[in-house]
């Protein structure tokens, strides 16, 4: 079975059509939001968005998925209406490169939500301090078809490691990765997520862990894959007993099909801004949603026309 067949099995099959909030898509009157895996921010944040939409007259289900790559296929195929995605994966999707095998997906952005921080996590006792130290180790690079997997593979490559021969790869979500590191079945794992990520917080409360510095790999990432990657810092206090570290961040975008009804796109976005405080109670990453930053999407990803309409209206209020 191909990747798109797998994606269709992950989400519920909701037919995408032109519609409004009074006539939501899907034969049973529900929309679908493609989120992420257990222990990650997408799942928590996306669940909050689904509950908020549902409470405001727009029945919605949050789907647990492998995250970015699968999410974008789900939306493109009409199996979900809205998807959380990393910006670098969204760029790949609209350009039809790498995981998308030459197929340019018909997608647009509602806006940028917050930034994901790339974590490479190891036990302090392992002596692992840089990506190059992962040679010969057992490493989880993220769930299959996730944005974490995309970044994990690229990090290994720019560090001079062959992902197929220099490490023993595991394909685990963040919750599974944290459990595997704790029990010793892997030596390190990659995760791209908001701050803080619950599974890493839980791990850091029981084990001494380190986050590897990643800023040295940024120039090669930018050179090969574009400007979606920027320098960032996991500050002291984000995780218990974990030292601050320079890392790489990637914007998260909320994606829809390009043919979504403009009024629907406008109204969904307006609901998120109107209920931002409620979403921030679900996860603090929602506090990062601002009118200024939401409109900044990394080219060649474009804003949906309904989103453009909302931002223009909001600027005059």
Image: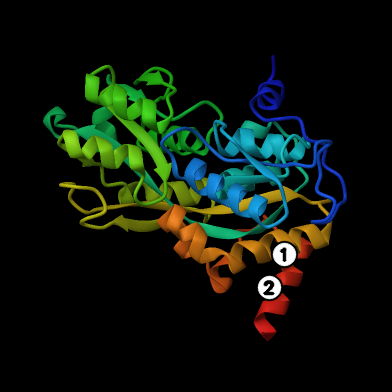
Mark 2 in CB contact with mark 1 (< 8 angstroms): yes
Tell me the quadrant of the picture where the N terminus can be found.
top right
Question: Foreground: 76 or 97?
Answer: 76
Q: Position of residue 258 (x, y in %)?
A: 79, 51
Q: How many C-alpha atoms fall within 10 Å of the one at disc 2: few (<14), some, or many (≥20)?
A: some
- Residue reaching furthest bottom? 316
Which structural element holds mark 2? helix
Tell me the quadrant of the picture where the C terminus can be found.
bottom right
Q: Position of residue 211 (x, y in %)?
A: 25, 42
Q: Is residue 206 visible?
A: yes
- Residue reaching furthest top? 1
Q: Residue at x 55, y 44 (%)?
A: 47
Residue assigned mark 2: 311
Q: How many C-alpha atoms fall within 10 Å of the one at disc 1: few (<14), some, or many (≥20)?
A: many
Name the quadrant containing residue 128. top left
Q: Residue at x 71, y 30 (%)?
A: 12
Residue assigned mark 1: 307
In the image, taking residue 217 as reference, residue 18 lies left or right, namely right
Numbered marks: total: 2
Q: Is residue 98 visible?
A: no
Question: Foreground: 73 or 44?
Answer: 44
Seen in the picture, residue 83 relative to 115 is either above or below; the reply is above
In the image, taking residue 20 as reference, residue 296 lies left or right, namely left
């Amino acid at each position: 079975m191909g990747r798109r067949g797998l994606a269709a099995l992950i989400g519920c099959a909701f037919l995408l059509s032109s519609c409004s909030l009074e006539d939501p898509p899907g034969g049973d009157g529900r929309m679908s939001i493609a989120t992420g895996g257990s222990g990650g921010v997408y799942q928590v944040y996306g669940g909050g968005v689904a509950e908020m939409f549902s409470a405001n007259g727009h029945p919605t289900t949050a789907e647990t998925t492998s995250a970015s790559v699968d999410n974008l296929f789900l939306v493109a195929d009409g199996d979900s209406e809205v998807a959380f995605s990393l910006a670098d994966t969204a760029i790949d999707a609209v350009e039809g490169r790498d995981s998308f095998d030459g197929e340019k997906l018909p997608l647009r952005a509602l806006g940028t939500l917050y930034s994901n921080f790339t974590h490479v996590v190891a036990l302090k006792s392992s002596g692992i301090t840089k990506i190059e130290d992962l040679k010969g180790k057992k490493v989880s690079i993220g769930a299959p078809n996730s944005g974490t997997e995309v970044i994990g593979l690229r990090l290994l490559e720019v560090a001079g490691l062959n992902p197929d021969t220099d490490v023993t790869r595991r394909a685990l979500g963040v919750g599974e990765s944290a459990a595997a590191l704790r029990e010793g079945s892997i030596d390190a794992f990659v995760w791209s997520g908001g701050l803080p990520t619950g599974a890493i917080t839980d791990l850091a409360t029981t084990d001494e862990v380190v986050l590897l510095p990643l800023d040295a790999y940024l120039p090669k990432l930018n050179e090969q894959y574009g400007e979606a990657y920027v320098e960032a810092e996991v500050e002291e206090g984000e995780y218990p007993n974990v030292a601050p570290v320079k890392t790489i961040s990637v914007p998260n975008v909320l994606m829809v099909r390009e043919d979504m009804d403009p009024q629907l796109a406008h109204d969904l976005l307006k609901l998120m801004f109107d209920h931002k405080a409620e979403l921030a109670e679900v996860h603090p990453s929602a506090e990062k949603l601002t009118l200024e930053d939401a409109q900044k999407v990394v080219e060649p990803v474009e804003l949906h026309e309904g989103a453009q309409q909302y931002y223009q209206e909001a600027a005059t209020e």
